[in-house]
Amino acid sequence: MKRVKRSKNQDERIVNDPFTNLANDMIIEILMKLRPRSIARLHFASKESSSIILDKKFIQWYMTRSLTQPRYLISLHGGGYMQMQLFQSLSQDHPYNHNMVSYEMEPDVLYEFTPPVRGLICGRDFTKMIVGNPCTGQFVSLPRVKTRRQDILSVFGYDPVNDVYKVLCMTVVLKRSHMSRNGNAVPWEDIVSEEHQVITLGAKEKWRMIECEYPHRHNSGCKGIYKDGFMYYLATYQKKKISNEL
């Protein structure tokens, strides 16, 4: 019987990979207790850990556990807005026990962020947009919003049916009957949305126009909720509720 020798590289992988000799159930139990930043690092540690971390069931378990632990998120911009620091408390009961990550930004860019959705946040500076995880400091840039308008409102949400994140952007225009001719400030209630664009996060990201029959004003800071293909958010239009089919 011929003995097969293990190569030196195989031995090194076994020593460096703590999950090699552990059962999947035990690995999952360990991963569930780790911070998101540690999870992100282990994603690159080995094929075994990566396959577990990217599994949809594990993502759902980890997300469900995280949502039961409300936390505080504070963003600070450094000098010249070149760096953004994100402070996240790891426990609502112990807010001083926190995690800090830094994100390097482009010069002269100041992002306005939407409320967090399932651990992700969306930032916009005019037509530039980013989406990322404040726990790990990993952000990705989205295609620029296609518009020549200066004022844009955005809503970030999650579609649980199709398991995708979506961003809705609305350009703002003033009602012609209420345009200010004497330089006075125009009342906020006279500001309505004009163009409506939506993008689905994924491999083929592209903005697409959608129709909206009702001129309305989206309340800034409101988090969108997806249900049955519709996005619901707080808006004002003759005291009626507004929803957009995405």
Image: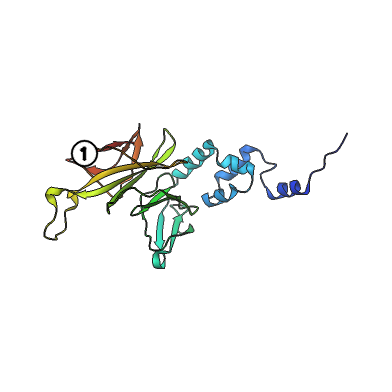
Q: Quadrant of residue 163?
A: top left
Q: Which residue does the image show at 59% across and 48% down from the upper left? A: 42
Q: Which residue does the image show at 59% across and 43% down from the upper left? A: 50
Position in image of residue 146 (x %, y %): 33, 47
Q: Quadrant of residue 86?
A: bottom left
Position in image of residue 174 (x %, y %): 19, 50
Q: Nearer the viewer, residue 225 or 91?
A: 225
Q: Nearer the viewer, residue 228 or 110?
A: 110
Q: Nearer the viewer, residue 144 or 226?
A: 144
Q: Which residue does the image show at 19% across and 52% down from the upper left? A: 188
Q: Nearer the viewer, residue 37 or 132?
A: 132
Query: For the C terminus, which image quadrant?
Result: top left
| Colour basis | rainbow
Position in image of residue 159 (x %, y %): 40, 37
Q: Is residue 97 left or right of residue 11?
A: left
For disc 1, the marked residue is 214
**In the structure shown, which secondary structural element does the residue marked by tag 1 occupy?**
loop
Q: Is residue 70 above or below residue 96?
A: above
Q: Is residue 11 left or right of residue 35?
A: right
The reply to whether residue 28 is visible in this rendering is no
Q: Which residue ends up furthest to the bottom in the rendered image?
A: 79
Position in image of residue 94 (x %, y %): 46, 55
Query: For the N terminus, which image quadrant?
Result: top right
Q: Which residue ends up furthest to the top in the rendered image?
A: 228
The amino acid at mark 1 is Tyr
- The tally of labels here is 1
**Structural crowding at the residue carrying mark 1, measured as other residues with C-alpha within 10 Å and reported as few (<14), some (14–19) or many (≥20):** some
Q: Which residue ends up furthest to the right in the rendered image?
A: 1
Q: Is residue 170 left or right of residue 41?
A: left
